Image: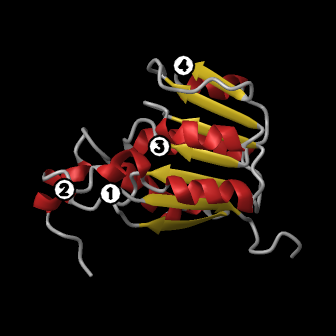
Amino acid sequence: MPYKNKSYIEAGHDQRYKQTEFATLLKEFVYYIEVETYMEIGIRSGYMFNQISPLVKRAVGCDIKPMPGVAQHPNVELYHMPSTELAKIWKDPIDLLFIDADHKKESVLRDFDLFSPYVREYIGVIALHDTYPRFVELTSDKFCNSAWEAAVEIKTNQKYKDFEIFTIPGPYAGLSLIRKAPNHLHWR
């Protein structure tokens, strides 16, 4: 079934998903893969981060802008800096990585390349937000930009052959789930 026309979104009917899209799914991943370390690149208001951080042993957030809406728990570490700076000091394994910062293809791929080496093989999950915008209007700089092109690059470029990717469309801007798996089964 095709999505409704863009007037549907312009009227604000899908705005409820703008911040909440896939929150329930990511919270389920916390339980499925027994997440200890959650990292979110691009926190903005902290909506997603605030839902995940109480569920994990260690919650790491990074944003270039102030993060006043982020709840402070003992397990929370906030880095007010570009992700490239955090990557220079990061050395620990990541179980669930959520990339939702600068939505340009190059920026999404840069964050993916910087932090995917730390995501645990086979069980770790990388989530890229805004990779299936419902309407072409959402590909503007104001919304999803070219993040969807990063998902296509990861799927098609031989450089990323050890990653499996699956993209879920909408309800607002989509989500790509990625797993580092050089082989389908870890024991094979």
For label 2, the residue is 9
User: Gap in Å between the C-alphas at discs 1 and 4?
Assistant: 28 Å
- Return the x and y of residue 26 as percentages of the image width and height: 58, 55
- Return the x and y of residue 161 as percentages of the image width and height: 63, 64
Left or right position of 164 against 132: right
Q: Which mark is residue 81?
A: 4
Under mark 4, the amino acid is Met
Question: Residue at the spot x=32%, y=57% of the render?
Answer: 172
Report the mark closest to the observer, 2 or 3: 2
Q: Secondary structure at mark 4?
A: loop
The mark nearer the N terminus, 2 or 1, is 2
Q: Give the quarter of the figure containing the C terminus.
A: bottom right
Under mark 2, the amino acid is Ile
Under mark 1, the amino acid is Tyr
For label 1, the residue is 172
Q: Are marks 2 and 1 in contact (CB under 8 Å)?
A: yes
Under mark 3, the amino acid is Val
- Return the x and y of residue 124 as percentages of the image width and height: 72, 55
Q: Is residue 99 above or below residue 130?
A: above
